[in-house]
Image (spheres, helix red, strand yellow):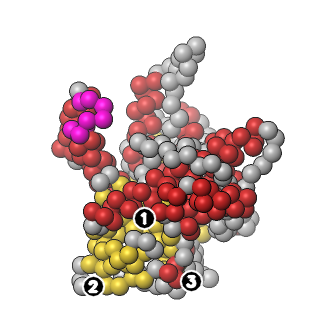
Amino acid sequence: MLAGRKYKLKLTVAQADQCREFGDICRAVWNTALDQRRQYRRRGAWMNYEPQAGELVDAKKEHEWLKAAPSHILQQTLKDLDRACKGRGTFNVRWRSKHRWRPSFRFPAGKSIVVERLNKRWGRAKLPKLGWVQFRMSRSLGGPVRSATVSRDGADWFVSFLVDDGQQTPERHVMPDAGVGVDRGVVAAVATSDGLLIDRNVVTAGEDARYKYLQRKLARQKRGSNNRKKTLAKMNRLRRRETNRRQDFCSQVAADLTGRNALVALEELRIQNMTRSAAGTVEEPGRQVAQKSGLNRAILAKGWHKLELALRNAARYTGTVVVKVSAAYTSQRCSRCSEVNPGSRESQARFRCVTCGHEVNADVNAAINVLAAGRAVAACGDTLSKKQEPQPALALVGIPRL
């Protein structure tokens, strides 16, 4: 089974400069290939990976700076672009901005990557053209390396190894009759059909005040100045700490739920649509924009999508089936008598059925309804969709140095 292992790198000054150069070259290749694809689409034609990979070879003869990066990471960039264009559409794929994009590049040839443990704390990996790079080896790899991705987050560089840990998904869960429904909320991140309300505050009051102070400080600083860059770096460190805590929370909850249940039922939520801005346009401005912005932040802060991804990842090791059911009326239906009435939802936290008088936490009631619908879906055989294999990749002539 393929799994990821992420570590913090300890690069020399020369290696950090090389990584920045590799990232810039990959960004230039991505943007040029995307521009070429869009030009072809405007003419009613198509461009894909094979011809672009061939044109990349010719472009390296014309532009010497392209040779600074290993060929296979540039080819992998084209493959990633091909997959993105096929999945989202050519005109929906974003440009990689110099100031907004976080540099990253992948070494796809796992056989050419050598990893060694130096001591209890540190390890090192030999990467093409970078040589030996040290990293904080917080856990063992657990299997042979398939690929390595180097990325930057703020001022720090990280390496992510894709490894084959040798494990297989069990054919049967250890508790085959157990199931749980999950309702995701903005007050409690997770409510289960067992009656549990699970939440975690990923930002302390001090960190929140510190971040707001840095925002005010940033607004007074000149764009492009060194002090502004330092402030942005401090803000990024606070946000990364928050992101890591949220990911840790989702992983722990997912491990607990999949370990105890053979079936996990979730509501099918279109989170991207739910968190879309309500600002509208100049001609038709939105309504209640401030309230909608607050709801969007609350949804994103609870990590709804991260929890779903964590559940699917953890389910591979336990044999748990993850199903998604329609969210319609789950919060208005009584879990005891199945009567649907909007008046039963008295408040955010309280549900009291106007028909039978059943009283329970509103989120727990919704989770029980989700579990019932999930068991029906699983009984019909419409279970978790198969994991899609990576698709073959993608789209260059005259690459400008961006």
Name the residue: 50% across, 19% down.
Answer: 287
| Residue 34 x, y percent position in the rendering | 63, 47
Residue extent of the magenta highlight: 221-228
Q: Looking at the image, can residue 78 be seen?
A: no
- Nearer-the-camera pick, 241 or 91: 91
| Residue 121 x, y percent position in the rendering | 24, 79
Secondary structure beneath dot 1 equals strand
| Residue 295 x, y percent position in the rendering | 43, 35
Q: Which mark is residue 168?
A: 3
Disc 2 residue type (three-letter): Leu
Q: Earlier in the sequence, mark 1 or mark 3?
A: 1
As drawn, which residue projects farthest toward the top?
283
Residue 271 among those drawn in magenta: no
Disc 3 residue type (three-letter): Gln
Kindly identify which residue carries mark 2. 118
Kindly identify which residue carries mark 1. 150
Q: Earlier in the sequence, mark 3 or mark 2?
A: 2
